[in-house]
Image (tube, rainbow, N blue to C red):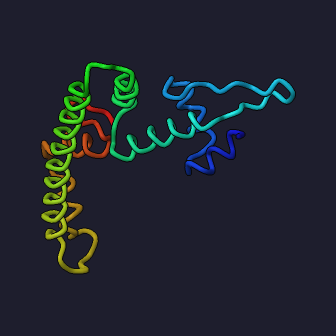
């Protein structure tokens, strides 16, 4: 099947498939000698499903690479369990930070209860106040938590 066909079946863009190929997550397909089109097969479809499922769980490309490599490792799934345990710890930490962010936003929202004049807006006044919470919020928004980029 052609790249557009496999993209449609998987539910991702052609650019995403090419990106996965460039990153080494997906093996480049053979090209048709007559028209130079890439020809994807069931192996590509299965691998793309695996990659997309891992991404839906918030796994990094490096984690996916490790899991793909472990599929050929006859030593059991100890390394896979370790990887998932570490990923779970990162997710739990992100949840804590997002919950802290939610609390900050709720407190911020309480600063302005009415429709007062903009000069008296408690939210704007609070945002102008110096605070040390900027680093945490930046980390949550960028997905960079404890060196774990998503």
Horizontal side of residue 40 vs 33, given as left or right: left
In the displayed orientation, state which residue is furthest to the right: 34
Is 65 displayed left or right of 141 in the figure?
right
Q: Quadrant of residue 55?
A: top left
x and y percentages locating residue 36 in the rendered image: 80, 27
Residue drawn at 24 percent across, 61 percent down = 124
Image height check: is 51 above or below 27?
below
Quadrant of the snapshot with the C terminus: top left
Viewed as shown, does residue 118 lie left or right of 95?
A: right
Q: Nearer the viewer, residue 92 or 122?
A: 92
Picture coordinates of residue 45 (x, y %)? 56, 40
- Residue 112 position in % (x across, y down): 18, 72
- Indicate whether 12 appears above or below 47: below
| Residue 128 versus residue 74 in the image, above or below | below
For the point 40% across and 27% down, the residue is 68
Where is residue 7, by image quadrant?
top right
Q: Is residue 127 above or below residue 22?
A: below
| Camera-side residue of 41 and 96 | 41
Q: Quadrant of the N terminus?
A: top right
From the viewer's side, name the closer residue of 5 and 138: 5
Report the residue at 16% width, 38% height from top. 89
- Looking at the image, how many numbered discs can be counted on the residues? 0
Q: Residue at x 56, y 25 (%)?
A: 27
Query: Which image quadrant is residue 92 in?
Result: top left
* Image location (x, y in percent) of residue 22: 56, 24
């Amino acid at each position: 099947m052609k790249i557009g066909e496999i993209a449609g079946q998987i539910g991702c863009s052609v650019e995403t498939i090419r990106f996965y190929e460039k990153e080494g997550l997906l093996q480049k397909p053979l090209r048709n000698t007559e028209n130079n089109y890439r020809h994807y097969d069931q192996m590509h479809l299965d691998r793309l499903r695996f990659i997309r499922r891992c991404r839906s769980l918030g796994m990094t490309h490096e984690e996916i690479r490790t899991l793909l490599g472990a599929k050929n490792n006859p030593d059991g799934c100890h390394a896979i369990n370790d990887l998932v345990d570490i990923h779970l710890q990162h997710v739990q930490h992100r949840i804590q930070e997002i919950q802290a962010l939610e609390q900050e936003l709720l407190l911020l929202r309480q600063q302005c209860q009415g429709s007062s004049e903009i000069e008296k807006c408690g939210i704007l006044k609070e945002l102008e106040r110096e605070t040390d919470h900027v680093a945490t919020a930046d980390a949550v928004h960028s997905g960079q938590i404890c060196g774990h980029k998503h």
